[in-house]
Image (cartoon, rainbow, N blue to C red):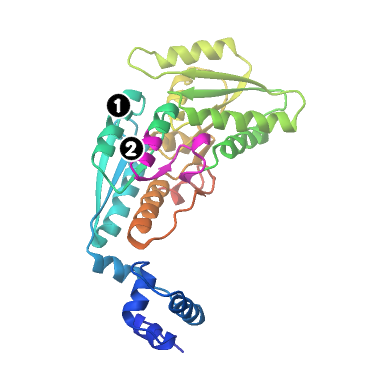
Amino acid sequence: MIEKKHTIKDIAKLAGVSKGTVDRVLHNRGRVSKKAKERISQVMTEIDYQPNLIARSLKNNKVYRICVLIPDETIDHFWIPALKGINAAAQEFRPFGLVLEKFHFHPNKKKSFLNKAEMAIAAKPDAILMTPMFHKESLKVFQECKRQNIRVASFNNHIDTLSLENFIGQDLNQSGRVAASLIDKVTDKNSSIAIMHIDEEAHMRQKEIGFKDYFKEKYKDGHRIATYSIKNGNNVDLESEISVFMASHDSISAVFITNSKAYLVVEALKKENKEITIVGYDLLKENLKFLKVGHIDFLIHQKPYRQAHQGLSYLAENLLFDKKIPSQKLLPIDIITSENAKYHID
């Protein structure tokens, strides 16, 4: 049996009031007596009334603008699937009056991030979806958005001091622990391990903390861990820098790369005549190539497409249908090997 879809007219009849009175209560506008409100509320509870938010949105004929603050995918290919997710979500909500504007910043330049953020805020959007790449600068952006009553959601990078904001991504500390457990399973207890940050960002340290905590909690001694951070700029010979580091830590048998650039480490280690376990992140084609031939052992999938798609969808549903945005949405941490990679490629 199909349940009847109740209308405002039905509520008015059951409550013994006019349709206009019900409409004022539903939209919280105009003056309505306390007694009428109570009767309408009681009827709505009894019939489990659910408003047709989609129809309401279409009727309002209002245009909502969302700005997206995202790293330039032509500089860092990690952001290509994220951009695809944003475009897909924008297409889904466009019929409801959603307008999207994207602001691409250089992933390694704070000034570029701030400039693009200022442009996004100056556009006076209803909401901003952003990736908080830089800690202090991101805080400034959040504070300014709050001052101007612009709704904000972030994805990919989680900044502790913004924990009460709307975040979509993974538990970065736990992600580091997962990487540690993988290396622990395939290396000797007394082996040495390297943590490598390439083009270090604030969130990578959270992965490092989780990684080290895993070993501290499991072993009282053993597993010497060395941390190495390097900028992959035009004036840096990455291969030589990594070779020098490895030569000074010749007992290293495993390397944990905290972002999507594991392939750069593999290329730099090609001349090293020993087997090294490599754990990195993300399904870039360069990483998948080395995963397939066994030069990378495990990749942790951060789901950039899903993060971005869900982040924009949450904002759109909040603006269009008054749907509450979860303060934090943590996605599963998937472990990718050469055997299951093809099932995770978007």
Label 1 with label 2: CB-CB less than 8 Å: no
Seen at 44% across and 57% down, the residue is: 324
Residue 120 in view, yes or no: yes
Above or below residue 267? Residue 340 is below
Q: Which mark is residue 137?
A: none
Residue 209 percent across, percent down from the top left: 60, 29
Residue 59 percent across, percent down from the top left: 24, 69
Is 101 displayed left or right of 174 in the figure? left
Q: What stretch of residues is rendered in magenta?
A: 141-169
Q: Mark 1: few, some, or many residues within 10 Å (few <14, many ≥20)?
A: some
Q: Amino acid at mark 2?
A: Ile
Seen at 58% across and 10% down, the residue is: 248
Above or below residue 23? Residue 174 is above
Q: Foreground residue, 16 or 326?
A: 16
Q: Mark 2: few, some, or many residues within 10 Å (few <14, many ≥20)?
A: many
Q: Which mark is residue 70?
A: 2
Q: Is residue 199 magenta?
A: no
Q: Earlier in the sequence, mark 1 or mark 2?
A: 2
Residue 110 percent across, percent down from the top left: 35, 24
Q: Foreground residue, 329 or 6?
A: 6
Q: Amino acid at mark 1?
A: Ser
- Find the residue positioned furthest to the right: 220
Residue 187 percent across, percent down from the top left: 66, 30
Seen at 64% across and 16% down, the residue is: 251
Residue 109 in view, yes or no: no
Task: Say what secondary structure mark 1 lies in.
Answer: helix
Q: Is residue 154 magenta?
A: yes
The residue under label 1 is 112
